Amino acid sequence: MIKHYWLGEFINTLMRTILIADDDPVILKLFEHNLLKSGFNVIKCTEGATVIAQAHLHKPDAVVLDYLLPGRTGLELIADFKADESLASIPLVIVTAQGKTMTKDELMAAGARQVFTKPFSPMLLVSALEDFMKN
Protein backbone atom coordinates (compact mmCIF):
# COMPACT_ATOMS: atom_id res chain seq x y z
CA MET A 1 0.00 0.00 0.00
CA ILE A 2 1.31 3.45 -0.94
CA LYS A 3 1.03 6.18 1.67
CA HIS A 4 0.11 9.59 0.32
CA TYR A 5 1.04 11.73 3.33
CA TRP A 6 4.50 12.31 1.83
CA LEU A 7 3.05 14.82 -0.65
CA GLY A 8 2.02 17.17 2.17
CA GLU A 9 5.44 16.84 3.77
CA PHE A 10 7.10 17.51 0.41
CA ILE A 11 5.00 20.63 -0.17
CA ASN A 12 5.82 21.90 3.33
CA THR A 13 9.53 21.60 2.60
CA LEU A 14 9.05 23.71 -0.53
CA MET A 15 7.10 26.39 1.33
CA ARG A 16 9.28 28.85 3.17
CA THR A 17 8.35 29.51 6.78
CA ILE A 18 8.22 33.05 8.12
CA LEU A 19 7.90 33.81 11.83
CA ILE A 20 6.03 37.08 12.43
CA ALA A 21 6.16 38.72 15.85
CA ASP A 22 3.88 41.70 16.42
CA ASP A 23 1.53 42.60 19.26
CA ASP A 24 -0.96 44.33 16.93
CA PRO A 25 -3.52 41.75 15.72
CA VAL A 26 -4.41 43.87 12.67
CA ILE A 27 -0.76 44.00 11.53
CA LEU A 28 -0.35 40.27 12.19
CA LYS A 29 -3.42 39.48 10.08
CA LEU A 30 -2.33 41.84 7.28
CA PHE A 31 1.18 40.34 7.08
CA GLU A 32 -0.14 36.80 7.40
CA HIS A 33 -2.67 37.30 4.59
CA ASN A 34 -0.08 38.70 2.17
CA LEU A 35 2.54 36.09 3.03
CA LEU A 36 0.12 33.17 2.71
CA LYS A 37 -1.12 34.56 -0.61
CA SER A 38 2.51 34.65 -1.77
CA GLY A 39 3.11 31.00 -0.85
CA PHE A 40 4.80 31.34 2.53
CA ASN A 41 4.00 29.29 5.62
CA VAL A 42 3.39 31.67 8.56
CA ILE A 43 4.01 31.26 12.29
CA LYS A 44 2.77 34.09 14.54
CA CYS A 45 3.62 35.24 18.03
CA THR A 46 2.66 38.34 19.99
CA GLU A 47 5.27 38.63 22.74
CA GLY A 48 9.00 39.19 22.63
CA ALA A 49 9.56 36.57 25.31
CA THR A 50 8.27 33.77 23.04
CA VAL A 51 10.07 34.65 19.80
CA ILE A 52 13.29 32.68 20.42
CA ALA A 53 11.39 29.58 21.58
CA GLN A 54 9.15 29.74 18.49
CA ALA A 55 12.21 30.13 16.27
CA HIS A 56 13.79 27.02 17.80
CA LEU A 57 10.54 25.08 17.45
CA HIS A 58 9.67 26.04 13.85
CA LYS A 59 13.10 26.78 12.31
CA PRO A 60 11.85 29.71 10.17
CA ASP A 61 13.56 30.81 6.98
CA ALA A 62 13.17 34.46 8.06
CA VAL A 63 11.75 36.40 11.01
CA VAL A 64 9.73 39.62 10.93
CA LEU A 65 9.88 41.48 14.26
CA ASP A 66 8.00 44.50 15.51
CA TYR A 67 10.53 46.85 17.12
CA LEU A 68 8.46 47.30 20.29
CA LEU A 69 7.15 43.92 21.39
CA PRO A 70 5.99 43.30 24.95
CA GLY A 71 8.98 41.88 26.81
CA ARG A 72 11.77 42.55 24.28
CA THR A 73 12.76 45.26 21.82
CA GLY A 74 13.82 44.54 18.27
CA LEU A 75 17.39 45.41 19.19
CA GLU A 76 17.37 42.93 22.09
CA LEU A 77 15.87 40.21 19.90
CA ILE A 78 18.47 40.76 17.19
CA ALA A 79 21.15 40.28 19.85
CA ASP A 80 19.39 37.11 21.06
CA PHE A 81 19.30 35.66 17.53
CA LYS A 82 22.92 36.55 16.79
CA ALA A 83 24.10 35.06 20.10
CA ASP A 84 22.41 31.71 19.37
CA GLU A 85 24.49 29.71 16.90
CA SER A 86 21.49 27.75 15.63
CA LEU A 87 19.55 30.96 14.85
CA ALA A 88 22.30 33.43 13.91
CA SER A 89 21.99 32.99 10.14
CA ILE A 90 18.22 33.58 9.95
CA PRO A 91 17.43 36.86 8.14
CA LEU A 92 15.72 39.34 10.46
CA VAL A 93 13.37 42.08 9.30
CA ILE A 94 12.34 44.80 11.74
CA VAL A 95 9.12 46.76 11.35
CA THR A 96 8.80 49.92 13.39
CA ALA A 97 6.60 52.95 13.86
CA GLN A 98 9.59 54.81 15.30
CA GLY A 99 10.99 56.11 12.01
CA LYS A 100 14.19 57.43 13.53
CA THR A 101 17.22 57.16 11.26
CA MET A 102 19.44 56.42 14.25
CA THR A 103 17.22 53.49 15.21
CA LYS A 104 17.35 52.11 11.64
CA ASP A 105 21.13 52.48 11.55
CA GLU A 106 21.45 50.77 14.94
CA LEU A 107 19.21 47.91 13.85
CA MET A 108 21.09 47.36 10.60
CA ALA A 109 24.45 47.51 12.39
CA ALA A 110 23.17 44.99 14.96
CA GLY A 111 22.23 42.51 12.23
CA ALA A 112 18.80 43.31 10.80
CA ARG A 113 18.71 42.58 7.07
CA GLN A 114 15.92 45.08 6.45
CA VAL A 115 14.05 47.76 8.43
CA PHE A 116 10.60 49.00 7.39
CA THR A 117 8.89 52.02 8.93
CA LYS A 118 5.12 51.71 9.37
CA PRO A 119 3.01 52.33 7.44
CA PHE A 120 4.34 50.54 4.36
CA SER A 121 2.96 48.22 1.72
CA PRO A 122 2.97 44.58 2.85
CA MET A 123 4.10 43.70 -0.68
CA LEU A 124 7.43 45.42 0.08
CA LEU A 125 7.85 42.93 2.91
CA VAL A 126 6.92 40.01 0.64
CA SER A 127 9.39 41.22 -1.99
CA ALA A 128 12.21 41.55 0.56
CA LEU A 129 11.53 38.07 1.94
CA GLU A 130 11.45 36.57 -1.56
CA ASP A 131 14.83 38.20 -2.24
CA PHE A 132 16.26 36.69 0.96
CA MET A 133 15.04 33.24 -0.11
CA LYS A 134 16.80 33.54 -3.48
CA ASN A 135 20.17 34.33 -1.90
Image (cartoon, rainbow, N blue to C red):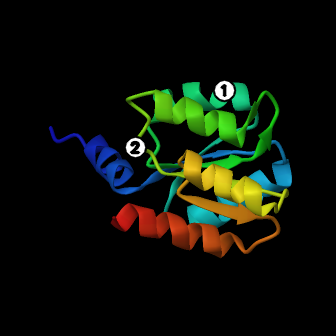
**Amino acid type at image mark 2:** Ser
Would you place residue 110 above or below residue 93 in this image?
A: above
Q: How crowded is mark 2: few (under 14 residues within 10 Å), some or many (20 or more)?
A: few
Give the left or right position of residue 124, taking residue 92 as reference.
right
Mark 1: secondary structure: helix
In which quadrant will I find the N terminus? top left
**Amino acid type at image mark 1:** Thr
Q: Identify the disc placed on residue 50.
A: 1
Instruction: Name the image quarter holding residue 50.
Output: top right
Please state the horizontal and vertical placement of residue 93, each as a whole percent of the image: 60, 54
Label 2 vs 1, first from the N-terminus: 1
Give the left or right position of residue 40, taking residue 114 as reference.
left
Would you place residue 47 above or below residue 121 in this image?
A: above
Mark 2: secondary structure: loop
Please state the horizontal and vertical placement of residue 74, each as a whole percent of the image: 70, 42
Instruction: Name the image quarter holding residue 118.
Output: bottom right
Please state the horizontal and vertical placement of residue 71, each as a whole percent of the image: 79, 27
In which quadrant will I find the C terminus? bottom left
Which residue is tagged 2? 89
Please state the horizontal and vertical placement of residue 22, each as a whole percent of the image: 75, 45
Contact check, label 2 and label 1, Cβ < 8 Å: no
